[in-house]
């Protein structure tokens, strides 16, 4: 296949084609064939969930493929794409492989990735209406619909699109600070995501008070004591789907305590939020609608390419603190004339139309399809727990709430567990996480691939057993 444009020389230059416009599709078509072939070839050559050899080997392969970062004369589109995409695919930790299960790192749906390509080609910038007419309308409609899922009785539910759970948590604390002032005291469980503490630091708020979570969920008695002792404005951050175990805090009881003590409630449902789509599991989120702010993240249990976060509120007026004016983007007379004002939709200025891939997924799968995917991976986690329970050489931490399973060889030390995990990584056999619970170190399997089978799980547990007995 010839290159879509002539490689420039010292005397002749050819302008590369653009992705957008009427001719954009024709320019992309041959390049996409190259990219798709390279993705397949890289994954085939890798052969497993990640490349063997460890950081130095991977870096050496990438260095060899990259060669000169900025050559005097370019190699052309086909060669550059084929070489570097193949190298990236070969050196990837592939979340689509059933033994890649360390993190909340989902294999994106093909339809969502295809929609993301369209967003990249059209390149709307979501900071002024005249750069994103249709995308801004789509974002408004979809975010309001999703916020209605979290706050069905809210007076005017709305949501902001974010880069993920970390930004959503940061915005939640920012909005609370703007309402209550800089003395706002955050209270969270020991099971809370690290971004809660980091957001308080970035915003100049007091260090959060950490409440014990001895069994993975926030201790209600300890929370009641803390709220009784503290004075001044309070924000309680609860979690629906912890990073380590997938546990869900007792949301209704926490909401009751917040009401009793006049505290604001934020719920980080970055992991567990999509249980709302499941008819059989949505009851686990009872109490979610009582939060002032809710973090969602659809590049976890929503199977979206990064990024696909949201921050939902029951009333759009709660977002007014983010309003901002830049005369070249949202002058007052344009706003009065009816042009939508987008700067208050994010602390970022330039941002991608990440809502498109979400909208395509919602339309294509519907509530039933998404709920089926959620149920499928949660059921897969139960299968893994069953396998561990039946294996006399493995210990199970607890039955999974979502799709995360903690387990470990019965007689292994913490040092052996840590070393075995790195051994699996170095040999390219499996990508498993690690978590401390009950005073011990555990393997963490976060199962987000709906195509994972019981046979895959049996192989995974055998790999763990073999790695800890070497």
Image: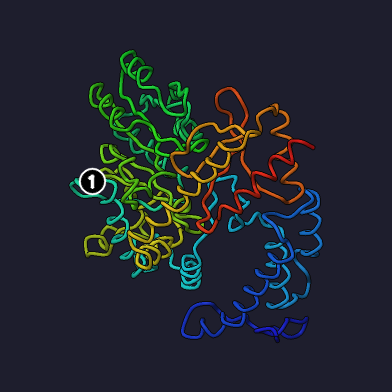
Residue 226 in which image quadrant: top left
Q: Quadrant of residue 231?
A: top left
Tell me residue 46's x, y (percent): 73, 61
Where's the N terminus, which quadrant? bottom right
Q: Residue at x 77, y 75 (%)?
A: 73
**What residue did someone put label 1 on?**
315
Is 461 or 244 nearer to us in this picture? 461
On the image, the x and y values in percent for residue 48 come to 70, 57
The residue located at (41%, 26%) in the rendering is: 218
Q: Is residue 186 above or below residue 301?
A: above
**Where residue 379 sits in the image (x, y, percent)?**
46, 48
Question: Farthest top residue?
Answer: 229
Q: How crowded is the residue under tag 1: few (<14 C-alpha within 10 Å), some, or many (20+)?
A: some
How many numbered circles are shown? 1
Give the image location of residue 182, x and y in percent: 37, 27
In front of the other: 127 or 245: 245
Q: Above or below — where is 234 with respect to 324?
A: above
In the picture, measured across the screen, residue 129 lies left or right of residue 420, that is: left
Residue at horizontal 31%, vertical 48%?
Answer: 323
| In-front residue for pair 10/240 | 240
Q: Can you tell which quarter of the image residue 260 is in? A: top left
Q: Is residue 39 left or right of residue 11?
A: left
Q: How is the image coloured?
A: rainbow
Element on which disc 1 rests? loop
Residue 292 visible to the viewer: no
């Amino acid at each position: 296949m010839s290159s879509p444009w002539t490689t420039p020389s010292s005397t002749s230059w050819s302008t590369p084609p653009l992705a957008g416009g009427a001719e954009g599709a024709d320019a992309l078509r041959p390049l996409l064939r190259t990219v798709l072939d390279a993705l397949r070839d890289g994954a085939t050559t890798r052969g497993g969930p990640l490349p063997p050899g460890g950081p130095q080997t991977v870096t050496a392969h990438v260095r060899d493929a990259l060669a000169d970062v900025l050559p005097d004369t370019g190699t052309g589109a086909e060669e550059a794409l084929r070489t570097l995409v193949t190298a990236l695919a070969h050196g990837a930790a592939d979340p689509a492989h059933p033994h890649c299960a360390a993190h909340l790192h989902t294999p994106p749906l093909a339809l969502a990735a295809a929609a993301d390509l369209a967003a990249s080609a059209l390149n709307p910038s979501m900071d002024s209406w005249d750069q994103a007419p249709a995308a801004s309308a789509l974002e408004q409609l979809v975010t309001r619909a999703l916020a209605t899922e979290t706050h069905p009785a809210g007076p005017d539910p709305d949501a902001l699109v974010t880069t993920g759970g970390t930004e959503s948590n940061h915005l939640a604390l920012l909005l609370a600070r703007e309402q209550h002032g800089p003395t706002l005291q955050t209270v969270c469980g020991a099971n809370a995501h690290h971004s809660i503490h980091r957001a308080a630091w970035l915003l100049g708020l007091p260090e959060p008070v950490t409440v014990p979570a001895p069994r993975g969920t926030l201790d209600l008695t300890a929370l009641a004591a803390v709220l009784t002792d503290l004075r001044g404005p309070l924000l309680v951050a609860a979690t629906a789907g912890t990073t380590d175990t997938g546990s869900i805090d007792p949301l209704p009881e926490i909401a009751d305590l917040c009401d009793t003590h006049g505290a604001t409630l934020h719920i980080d449902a970055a992991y567990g939020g999509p249980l709302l789509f499941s008819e059989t599991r949505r009851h686990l989120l009872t109490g979610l609608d009582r939060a002032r702010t809710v973090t969602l993240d659809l590049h976890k249990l929503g199977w979206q390419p990064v990024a696909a976060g949201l921050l939902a509120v029951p009333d759009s007026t709660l977002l007014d603190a983010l309003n901002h004016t830049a005369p070249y983007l949202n002058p007052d007379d344009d706003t009065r004339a009816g042009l939508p004002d987008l700067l208050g939709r994010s602390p970022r200025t330039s941002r991608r139309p990440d809502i498109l891939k979400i909208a395509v997924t919602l339309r294509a799968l519907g509530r039933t399809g998404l709920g089926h995917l959620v149920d499928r991976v949660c059921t897969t986690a139960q299968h893994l727990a069953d396998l561990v329970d039946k294996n006399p050489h493995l210990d199970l931490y607890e039955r999974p709430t979502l799709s995360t399973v903690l387990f470990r060889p019965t007689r292994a030390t913490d040092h052996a567990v840590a070393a075995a995990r790195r051994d699996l990584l170095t040999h390219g056999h499996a990508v498993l996480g690690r978590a401390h619970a009950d005073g011990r170190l555990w393997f963490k399997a976060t199962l987000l691939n709906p195509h994972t089978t019981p046979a895959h799980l049996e192989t995974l547990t055998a790999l763990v057993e073999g790695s800890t007995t070497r």
